[in-house]
Amino acid sequence: MIALYGRASVLEAARIALDILRAQIGSGSLEANEFDAAITTLPSVLEKRIKRTVQPSLRPVINATGVIIHTNLGRAPLARAAVERIAEVATGYSNLEFDLEKGERGRRDIHAQNLFQQLLARNGVPTTATVVVNNNAAAVLLALSALAEGGEVVVSRGELVEIGGSFRIPDIMSRSGATLREIGTTNRTRIGDYEKAISERTKLLLRVHRSNFEIVGFTEQPALAELVELGKRRGIPVMEDLGSGALVDLEEYGIADEPNVYASLRTGVSLVTYSGDKLLGGPQAGIASGDPTLVARLRSHPLFRALRVDKMTYAALEATLGAYLREEFDSLPLLHILRASAESVRARCEKVSEKLQVVVGLSVEIVEVRSVIGGGAAPGKTLPSFAVSLAADGVNATELALRLRKGKKPVVARVEDGRVLLDLRTVAEDEDDIVVQAIVDAVKK
């Protein structure tokens, strides 16, 4: 054990185990035969304790929930090329902040800039700059701090959203030093409301995409083009927080009415902020693209250094953007999952079901389900899919789902109507056999 885990870990585990044993002896709670059994099993008890202690808590899991961008499960899975680039850059030195041509200190934020510029120019937005920070909330905070500190930001009441973890847009704005100027009502805001709110203190007009909820019924919202026209007429920049910005037209993937970064910038928005690890399908990052003059102000703000990303994020982001430039969309796991047809998922469910027919005490069905986009993206939008439905004799659904989560490779499923559902849309094809074995092991327990 010392050779495997180190002397300090073994010594600590031995002391804990012996303290417990001494306490049991002292209290008279151990019979002689129980004492002998405790001594006999002590080595295995020690090893189990050590394994629990040294095993990393962050583990890979199989997402069988059908939630495509699952915030609790790490959001978008990275492309293989991104993982390879991380390994290539992280295992040695790199030119993160070094200009190889000049032989002097350089800037880390140039690495993704060129790729973003090419992508945006190719999609009708020729003159832009981009800056990258550690998540979209950070991008919003940086933009508001750099562009509106000490002034007012006009925003509709219906867009004052709360994102995951109880973080609220108004709270982020207050931290930026900007004053929030709410206009309109929860369900209806007109362009005239924006115009009336503008004063000599107005620094920014803000549009926040409702990325994690919908308002339906008696509603009104000015078109983005109207807001841009007002901003130009009054000399005030317009910023749009897209949240989970896409770099493809999601109509092709069966997701309607979800804005993308290109469309916003083509409309004339001064600055767009969005996430790297949601609909873009890359690493966690917050990205701000738009007017080079405004982006330069973000780059020179003191907060930028506090919010900047590391070499591994840049490496993964460059590899992801490279896939977009080469139009290798299927190499990005997120887009591959979105593109998969319901029938292809059903075919995989049938193969898994066939392999499970031999398991005694297990009832298996294939059922129609709807996969959710998730991650605060495309609210209300779902994709047709199929799931393997499980019921085991003598084991309720909650217990079976727990066993799957506690397996050698955790499988996270969902429980509905007393059955465990595994939506294979969000399971990689090469994980199907692992899922089968995990189910067999869970039932045998």
Image (spheres, rainbow, N blue to C red):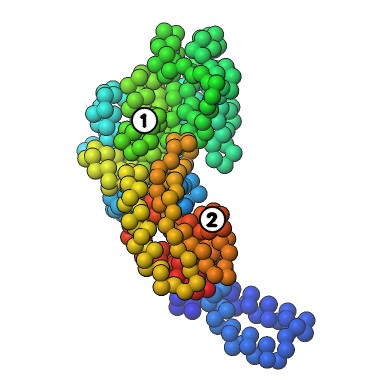
318 vs 137, left or right, is left
Residue 348 percent location from the top left of the image: 34, 57
75 in relation to 349, above or below = above
- Identity of the residue furthest to the right in this view: 27
Of the numbered discs 1 and 2, the one sitting upstream in the chain is 1
Residue 289 percent location from the top left of the image: 36, 28
155 in relation to 333, above or below = above
**Local crowd size for mark 2, using a 10 Å CA cut-off: few (<14), some (14–19), many (≥20):** some
Residue occupying the point 27% across, 47% down: 331
> Tag 2: residue type?
Val
Q: Which residue is mark 2?
A: 415
Residue occupying the point 55% across, 21% down: 218
Q: CA distance from mark 1 to mark 2?
A: 33 Å
Q: Secondary structure at mark 2?
A: strand
Residue 60 percent location from the top left of the image: 43, 58
User: Looking at the image, which is closer to me, 376 or 40?
Assistant: 376
> Tag 1: residue type?
Asn
